[in-house]
Amino acid sequence: MSQNFRLNTGGLINRDKPIEFKFNGKKYIGYEGDTLASALLANGIHLIGRSFKYHRPRGFFGAGVDEPNAKMQVEINGCSEPNINATEIELVNGLSASSQNCWPSVNFDIGAINNFLNRFFPAGFYYKTFMWPKSFWYRVYEPFIRKAAGLGIASLEKDKERYEHKYEYCDLLVTGSGPAGLASAYAAAKNGAKVILAEDKPRYGGTLLTDDVTIDNLSGKDWSEKIISELKEMPNVIVKNRSQVFGYYDHNMMVMFERTGDHLEKKPKHTPRQRLWYIRAKEVLLSTGSIERPIVFGNNDTPGVFLSAAAKEYMKVYGVLIGKKPIIFTNNDSGYETAIEFKKNGVNPIVLDTREDQNSELINEAKDLDIKIKFSYAVIVAHGYKKVKSATIGKLNKEKIDFVNKEQIDCDSICVSGFWTPTVHLASQSGNKLKFNDSIDAFVPDKSKQNEHSLGAANGTFTLQDTLKNSFNTGSEVSKSITKKNEKIQIPNTNERKYSAHDKFWCSPLPKGKNYKRFVDFQNDVAVSDIEVALREGYRSIEHVKRYTTLGMATDQGRTSNLNGLQLVANVEKKIVPQVGHTTFRPPFTPVTIGTIVGREIGKEYMPTRKTPMHHWHEKNNAVWVDAGAWKRPRYYKRGNENLFEASKREAKNVRDHVGICDVTTLGKIDIKGPDAAEFLNRVYTNAWLKLPVGKARYGVMLREDGIVMDDGTTTRISENHYHMTTTTAQAANVLSHLEYYLQIVWPELNVNVVSTTEQWAGAAIAGPKSRDLLAKLFSKIDVSNEALPFMGYVEGDLFGVKARIFRISFSGELAYEINVESDFGLFMWEKIIEIGEEFNVQPYGTEALSTLRIEMGHVAGPELDGRTIPYDVSLEGLVSKKKDFIGKRSLAKEAFNQADRQKIVGLVPLDRKSSIPEGSHLVENKNAKLPNPKLGHVSSSCWSVENNNPFSLAILKDGKNMIGKKLFAVSPLKNTSIEVEVMSSHYVDHEGKRVRS
Amino acid sequence: MLNIKCPYCGDRSQKEFAYGGDGTITRPKLNQEISDEEWDNFVYLRKSPRGKHIELWHHIAGCRQWFKVERDTTTHEIFRTFKPEE
Ligand SMILES: [Zn+2]
């Protein structure tokens, strides 16, 4: 079959460029400029899928975003993508599409039996049918639904395509390039405003491409081309086609989806497939047009039933006939435009007009063309299973609730027009409360909540003259207030045919005793009877009816079904539509690929990776990485076949026996300056800071106002009014915000400045009994003796020409120092220490050994300071000043914090001295007690003590200080272990802290 | 995504800011005698007003200044933004 329904002339397609494509495995030819839908229709293909619930055969119904049925699985560059609207995707060579929602094939679909069993698939069928027996859900229902229903199949392949995000700012965003969009964008651009004009389709002009009108004696199409080419020349205007503004968010944040790649046969390498635009617009002009409303009748979902304007668009834009024997079924003059277009192309349509005999320019033109018109007539039911073959029509009675003169006439298509529904989705998303306009039986935007205006058909204005006048004026007015320019624009003359009044008829009566399905929502397979059932069952709120029946949901968002659904509810409830109200329109207006939403933020681009200046050295020395926030830190350095346990034991042991070096660059560093710095620290930390001399460091703990420990670290007085604070790696950002809050909001009278210097300093900790010997060799010019540089001392030195800060602080319980140099010299420092440290047996150690060392000595860290502990809980009471006030102090007086059996940090050793205790284990008295077994505490940190060569853990234990010596069980249901442990002091190594001070 | 005018930097996207809670809370003075109830009110109790609300925001990915925003909690309309001392 070769394009039997293609007209020989006309349309905007390029007949010189045939394009080959596949549908359901079969090859077809279309033309450049076709959509997949128009090319299939040119080949006479109507049956394209099965309906969602009843698996009834479905065909094309619309020609653009209005299409509810034609969702296809499309292969693009080796990736298979579901739910692509065939009326929107452009034809390119090699495109391959297939029907979805049918199994095993579109022509023979097992699910169609649902149609004959439809008494079992009533409204709310998900809620009713699949509820019991409960055990059937996983075994029977879910696999069945997944196979038989659903909307296409997501690809399991990795998406190889590239997607991008873009941010723009503009004075005016205009959504849609029909007459309203063109006029308003043009007027605003002339006033010098920065304008973005977005058109969803490949071609600009909207209805100007299909309506028989002239503007300033140009055809609609020529006028739109003229305006677009002028706009494109203007530097203050961005004109975008294939771009759908799909979401209206707060403060005029508009989100737009641009199809940049799929229509290109050979996409250049760096062109993304799709692009997401975030546009912050001062004003938004919504020129989204309107969508034709269907009229509901029996079997109105049979392939071959179209919206009348879609049929016209297929002829005028694509040169395609959707049928050669059409019935036009209309309640207004629009149907006549389609009839006239058919007639001009040599097809004889018959018009059924639900209105009584009347005249208008259009009707008279149709009559002059000898088009057969039957007034007061309606299509009652369509016949044919996979394609319309005939229709039963009838003459409506006066009330239009019954009919006479039933007759069956042959036809191959039925084009319906039930008047027009303004596309108010974006306006509604903006928070605009819509109002009902009686004269067009539809909702239109009311008061703007944000800076938006709806224009033209989107605002219920259906004549070209009024649309242009309002749009030029609004474009002018809105831009004038932004740019203060006021360019006068002559509003063009138009020539259009006047419509006579439409009829409110929207649903044909059924023949007596027949129950043909009359569909309101094609995509969600919701028929009149489904909504009636929902109402009979007591659903009243339209929002509930929507959820129960699925009316207006999914990708379709009620574009064609919304108003008829509301009308039906209103009729049954004996209300009027505005009393029923409308459901909420939600973004996205049309489906958006997940790839576009994610953009480039995938894989390692998901978030930045922070590397220390010594990163490459670690890499070369077989570091195994661990993530610490965005930082990469060496967890251990693998030697030979070592595993984590062996390597970390070796590294920790080397610190206890000789000397180790650890990259501590990731610690948060904050520079604090100002005459009130000491006073500020005194308020921030729990201990006293006013008397810290220059050249000395102090360990400090800071609390939140609720008394919970926030962070710990050392702060060093570099000079009179200059301090250097360190924080834990994890809390660095929070601590800085915390300090800024108190300085800016609570105590602005303090003259202090804080700034993060984390990335300005590279840090290396050298720890172990040989660390002083190593330090002396590194800094030969300064005295590093215990007297000159005591524990918690600070000195500046010269590291082979590089200025260095030396802090004598320890996190390991050993004699230790921390050296800081400017980041650029970090690697130099590190390599010097490794080189000179060789004679002392220096080895690098990673975070695992670091943890082992701090756990052994009972130094608390993140697992203990977990947002639930106060200083007393973690044995830091010695640091809590009784004399001065500080952040969070008042909370420490709380009764619960001072109970005798309050939780406390303790150490644990397994009785067998062998079994490692899983972190997170619960501590219980009796492992065999009846559940719930009372929990006394939990294991926070575990290590293998290299000092004592057996496992050791820290735990937070109820009444911990009175539990020393007791035996408990550490139970981990996750690891399925239950280990008998002895409670002891949390300081397992060097109780008196002699080593750090020696 | 809100558009917030930092009083120091100008209009910026919400992405650059962190929310800082109720902006009308005053911390009790240091060393002030204060009842348990008053202290608990300060630490824990916050109103959740429907409508206008003065709140703190922090320009973390910008000038790092804390400032105040008067915002409608139902519509997100921002009436004004101002420096804490104003
Ligand atoms: Zn700022």
Image (spheres, rainbow, N blue to C red):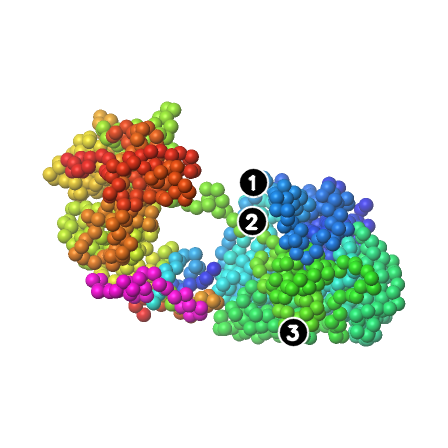
Q: Is residue A75 left or right of residue A835?
A: right
Q: Position of residue A262 (x, y in %)?
A: 62, 48
Decide which of tag 3 and tag 1 comes sooner along the chain.
1
Are tags 3 and 1 found on a single chain? Answer: yes
Badge 3 is on which residue?
Answer: A437
Q: How far is disc 3 from disc 1 in space, using C-alphas?
A: 49 Å
Q: How far is disc 2 from disc 3 in space, using C-alphas?
A: 37 Å
Q: Which residues are magenta?
A: B25-53
Q: Amino acid at mark 3?
A: Asn
Q: Residue at x 37, y 44 (%)?
A: A934
Q: Which part of the image, by quadrant, shows the C terminus of chain A?
A: top left
Badge 1 is on which residue?
Answer: A158
Q: Residue at x 64, y 58 (%)?
A: A548
- Nearest to the eye among marks 3 and 1: give it: 3
Decide which of tag 2 and tag 1 comes sooner along the chain.
1
Q: Nearer the viewer, residue A975 or A63?
A: A975
Cβ of mark 2 under 8 A from ligand 1: no
Q: Amino acid at mark 1?
A: Lys
Q: Secondary structure at mark 1?
A: loop
Q: Would residue A593 be counted in the magenta stretch?
A: no
Q: Which part of the image, by quadrant, shows the N terminus of chain A?
A: top right
Q: Which mark is residue A594?
A: 2
Are tags 2 and 1 found on a single chain? Answer: yes
Q: Secondary structure at mark 3?
A: strand
Q: Is residue A395 left or right of residue A639?
A: right
